[in-house]
Amino acid sequence: MIDLGSQRLKGRVALVSGGLRGIGLACVERFLAEGAEVVLTDLEAPDTDHAAATLARLGQAASYVQANVAQEDDWAKVLSAVTERHGKLHILVNNAGIDLTGPVAETSLEGWRRIMSINVDGVFLGVRTFVPLMAASGADFRGGASIVNVSSIMGLVGMSEVSGYNASKGAVRLFTKSIALEFAEKKMPIRANSLHPGFVMTPLLQEGFQRWVDKGVAGKAQDLVDLMSSKTPIGRLADPSELASAVFFLASSDSSYMTGSELVVDGGWTAQ
Amino acid sequence: MGHVQRHSHWEIAVKRLEGKVALVTGGTSGIGAGTVERLCAEGARVIFTGSNQAAADAVCAATGALFIRHDVTDVSAWDGLMARILEEYGRLDIAFANAGTENGDGSIESIGIEGWNTIIGVNLTGVMLTVQHAMRAMARNPEGPVGSIIVNSSMNAHRAMGNFVAYSVSKTAVLALVKSSAVHSGNRKYKIRVNAVLPGVVETAMIANLIEKSGDPAATRAAYEGLSPMGRMASVDEVAGLVAWLASDETRFCSGSEFTMDGASTAGMNGV
């Protein structure tokens, strides 16, 4: 772990979707360590064992709203919660996402629409919901408010039997560039950038690997971890905290001139 | 040139680079000088190179960094430079290949072979020599091959300028150098990362001078500022913040990547 203890986000309010697990949870933890107040959303009811234990550990500076990013009504609920508790928003991390694998000829329209509704609609709705509040909050800090949309290296390069996920993450990449241009041209104090993780040890990845094992592609999930590690120049998968450190950079004033950019954190995967 | 501004708004509460030794080429002015200052502020011990002694003295006085007169294109002087760094500091953790020129550039029709060779010599061969010698030195670090190498490319790597053919070519070429070097490092199981930064127009003393000496300073300034949809140039410290982040352990999983910081200049199709 990086030695934290600095408070470089003190006074800022952050919202993270999909904040109970994986990269989202790592972002929440990092923001809290940097002195921010954080609202996180996820699908789980707050009184499940996992959610309750996680929220208790995160402490008073964090608060939780149960919400599905694909539901417009749920975003209205999130906006009310953020507005009532904080009255401002400086950092929005649209992180919630799901995967979808399989041959394109066997992909159901239902499955296709589900991944698009979460990975693409969810990002659009998050941005649309919070642009006015972020525009009003952006002048508080150098570099303004910051939106980080979590895409993937699968938003940059294709992979066989990942067509739905590829399409959804590619959409996030260009959606982000368009809103970055819009905010810049209108002199709105909001920056927008996309994050492109490579293979990260998250629950989503581990569940995906398990599905490959169930299909008989590999003997056990660890074999797939080893295979992906061997194909990554850095020789291992990422820890979620290593993505959170990139999101932290994008959230901080150090990235004040960065908007419309794509941050690739992939251990060299797409360089080769 | 050589004037180093103090930036009290840097949000540095933790010295991320304590104990690290850094080399910055072309460190006497502009982005180089700003980066020397930022790396020192984060706790690194910094050696910088260049040719302007008076400018170097000012940087040394402001930062406590060590200046060594050295020309990146002087092949025979590299071994001596690295020997001196390793002798005095015992290690190398960070190298910022920053020295660059556009002196003698022109369009494909007008450029002379002398201008072409100068620019390719500094911006491409000089960067190759920097990365080569930095990686060799980092490979011999006491605890094993570890370090971070950062190459200063430009947004012009992806948006060529008609009247700066050699500069545009050199800035694209170094991206392949970065990726090849990153993949090589992975092949050797090194923990040496190699990444590129691609700044937009940065308001350096050199640019300020160009504006002042143009026939119409107001129009020239507006033209530079208009290259970004944000309507302004980057400041030196904004690029230095990106370099410092890449130099730190925050980016242990980043290698072979391009980090664009250009105020959305290349996010759209405005052209530069």
Image: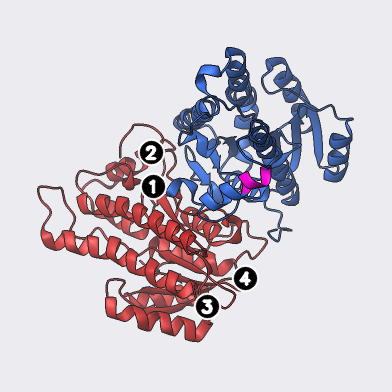
Chain colours: A blue, B red
Residue labelled with disc 1: B200
Q: Which mark is residue B266?
A: 2
Q: Give neighbour class at mark 2: few <14, some 14-19, many 20+ (Cα, 10 Å).
A: many
Q: Amino acid at mark 4?
A: Glu
Q: Secondary structure at mark 1?
A: loop
Q: Which mark is residue B18?
A: 4
Is residue A42 or residue B114 the one in the foreground?
A: A42
Q: Secondary structure at mark 2?
A: loop
Marks 4 and 1 sit apart, C-alpha to C-alpha, by 29 Å
N-term mark: 4 or 3 = 4
Image point (29%, 51%), residue name: B211
Instruction: Write down the chain letter for disc 2.
Output: B
Disc 4 + disc 2, Cβ < 8 Å: no
Disc 2 + disc 1, Cβ < 8 Å: yes
Q: Which mark is residue B91?
A: 3
Query: In this image, A119 relative to A210: left or right?
Result: left
